[in-house]
Each structure stands twice: as structure tokens, then as C-alpha cells.
Amino acid sequence: MSYRRLLPAFTGLLLAAGILLWFIARAGTSASLGVFSELDIGVQLGLFGGVLLAMLMASVALIQCQIARPLHRLVNYVKHQQDGDRGEPPKSLMRRQDDIALLTKKIQRLLVTLREQNEQLLEQTLNDPLTGLGNRRLLEQRLNTALPLSRRRMAPLSALMIDVDHFKPYNDHYGHLAGDDCLIEIANVLRDIFRRDTDIVVRLGGEEFVVVLLDVELDEAVRLAEAMRGMLQAVGIPHVESPTAPVVTVSIGVATAQPGTPIDVENLIACADAALYQCKARGRNCITSCIVNVDMTPASVSVLG
Ligand SMILES: Nc1nc2c(ncn2[C@@H]2O[C@H](COP(=O)(O)OP(=O)(O)OP(=O)(O)O)[C@@H](O)[C@H]2O)c(=O)[nH]1
């Protein structure tokens, strides 16, 4: 029985007991209630008190079992949800037919909505809205976990800094919207080439993209960079203003940190950037690679070709 029906019942019983006690007390003094009138007044009062106490204890037990305990379970459910638990509310709460069940269902729905909205917000803060790739924050977040792990496992790590060649003349000639479409197309090529779950592919800003490949040696990183460059050229986005090629091309700086090199996000990107700079100097639409040195200053990048 739900507390909504039990409480009025107990209140009624208490009331009835009170009236009964009052009646018996009166009967005791008017000596018209046979057996009670023969009892000592102290015993009569003791009896009344006992009945009252029993009723009170029953009420407390009822409140404890029907209200306090379920509410405690509800609080525990909310606490666990706050700690990241995704479980359902206790079945004993969901099965009820009262306000506590209603409250539980409402809280559950509210928590699901909040969680979904949080996930959407988080995605927005970690994604580039134009291309749908990750952004710099996502790169930092994932590298903060990946770099120490990679160091501990003594695994190599490679970063590719990809920059669109002559993008300003492209924008000037075809317009900013066409420029946006071009960036989206490049992002699609990146998605096609870098498919591993561990690959981190982000748009750093403007016409610059970064790819970080965990557990990938320099040779493999250069091969993938070459595949990306080739695929974009094969897509053939016309670029009549480019002095390099009749289509949109990219320059790619590849930096590889050998197993155990103590690098951080900034240093890795700085080294790949230095390699990219060499690429641009060599005439664009090419790949330059380097090994990240232990002192990790961009100036220490040794270009391999
Ligand atoms: N359409 C579009 N253009 C952008 C976006 N972000 C940056 N750009 C443009 O990208 C161009 C980058 O130009 P530059 O930095 O001079 O580079 P570049 O012309 O590609 O020259 P190189 O890199 O030396 O080959 C600028 O014209 C920016 O306005 C964007 O989100 N959308």
C-alpha cells in the first residue's frame, strides 16, 4: 500500500484511538464501563499510554519504510549518477505508484536530458564546426593522455602539420564560401586516410590541419602523408591561381619523436611546423620530415627530406 493511502489510515486510527482513550477515561470516572471502571486509574493510564505509544511507533515505522527509506534510495541514486554511474534508478522506486515514483522518473528524465546536453556542449567545444574534425582543444586533451602512455610504452609518435598551398589566392578568386567547401573536402580526404581509432585528426585553425599518429614510425608517417597529398591531388579541386599546380595542393611537415623522447604537445607541433616551413621554402606541394631531437627546440629539427 502506498504511503498516500496509509498515512490517512494511520491518522484516522490515531484519531480513533484518541477518542477511544478519552471515552474510556471518562467511563473510568463515571464507573459505567464495567471492566475498565474496576481497574486502578494508574493502570488505566498505563494502558492508554501503551496504546498511544504503539500507535506512534507504528506511525514512525510506516514513515521510515514508506517515505524516509525510499527517499534515501533516491538520494543515493542521484549521488551515484553524479559520480558518473549511468544505471537505472532502483526498481523498488520505479514500481511504486506514488509521488516518490513520479519524482524518481522526473529526476531520471532530467539527468538523461542534462547528460545529452552536456555531451553536445562538450562535442561543440572539442570540434571544428566547419569540417567536423577535432580542434586544438581536442588535440591537447587527447595528447595529454596519449603522450605519457606512449612514453611509458616506449612507442614512437608522429605528427603531420598540413597546410593548404596558396589558399589566400584561392579564397580571393573563388570566394570565401568556396574556400570553406575546399576545407571540408580536405577534411574528408584526411578522414579517408587516417582511419585508426588512435589517429588524432584536427583542424588547428585557418587552412592548417594536424594529424598525430600514435605508435607510428617516421617511414610510415611519411608514407601516409604522401598518400594524403596524392589523394587530394587526385580529387582535383581546381585552383587556377596556384603557381604550383592547376589543383589545390598541400604541404606537409612530418615530425617523429623516437621512443622515449620526452616531448609535449607544443614541442611536437613546433617541430612539425618547422618541417612544414621547410616544405614551403622548397616550393610547396611536398613533404618534409624530421626527427624530434631531445632538446626539442624547433631550431634543432633535422630535415630529412
Ligand atoms: N574560406 C576560408 N578561408 C579561411 C578560413 N580560415 C582562414 N582562411 C583564409 O586562408 C588564407 C590563408 O592565407 P595565407 O596564410 O596567406 O596562406 P596561403 O595563401 O595558403 O599561402 P601559403 O600557405 O604560403 O601557400 C587567408 O586568406 C585566410 O583568410 C576559413 O575558415 N575559411
Image: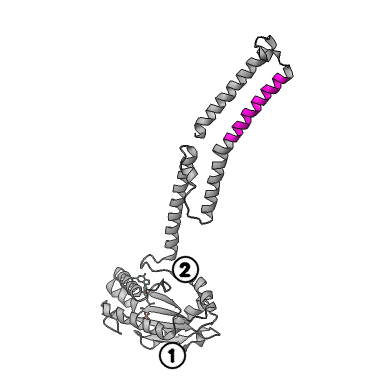
Image location (x, y in percent) of residue 6: 52, 31
Which residue in the protein does label 2 denote? 137
Q: In this view, does 284 lie above or below 22?
A: below
Q: Can residue 234 be seen in this view?
A: yes
Helix, strand or loop at mark 2? helix
Tell me the quarter of the picture where residue 68 sits: top right
Q: Magenta span has 49?
A: yes
Which residue in the protein does label 1 denote? 304
Q: Which residue is drawn at 43% across and 77% down?
A: 213
- Residue type for callout 1: Leu
Image location (x, y in percent) of residue 81: 51, 53
How many discs appear? Answer: 2
**Span shown in magenta:** 43-62
Helix, strand or loop at mark 1? loop
Neighbour class for label 2 at 10 Å: few (<14), some, many (≥20)? some
Tell me the quarter of the picture where residue 34 sits: top right
Q: Distance between the residues labelled 2 and 1?
A: 30 Å
- Residue type for callout 2: Arg
Q: Main secondary structure of the magenta part?
A: helix
Q: Which of 163 and 44 is in front in this view?
A: 44
Residue found at the very far front of the displayed protein: 35
Image location (x, y in percent) of residue 153: 52, 78
Image location (x, y in percent) of residue 111: 47, 50
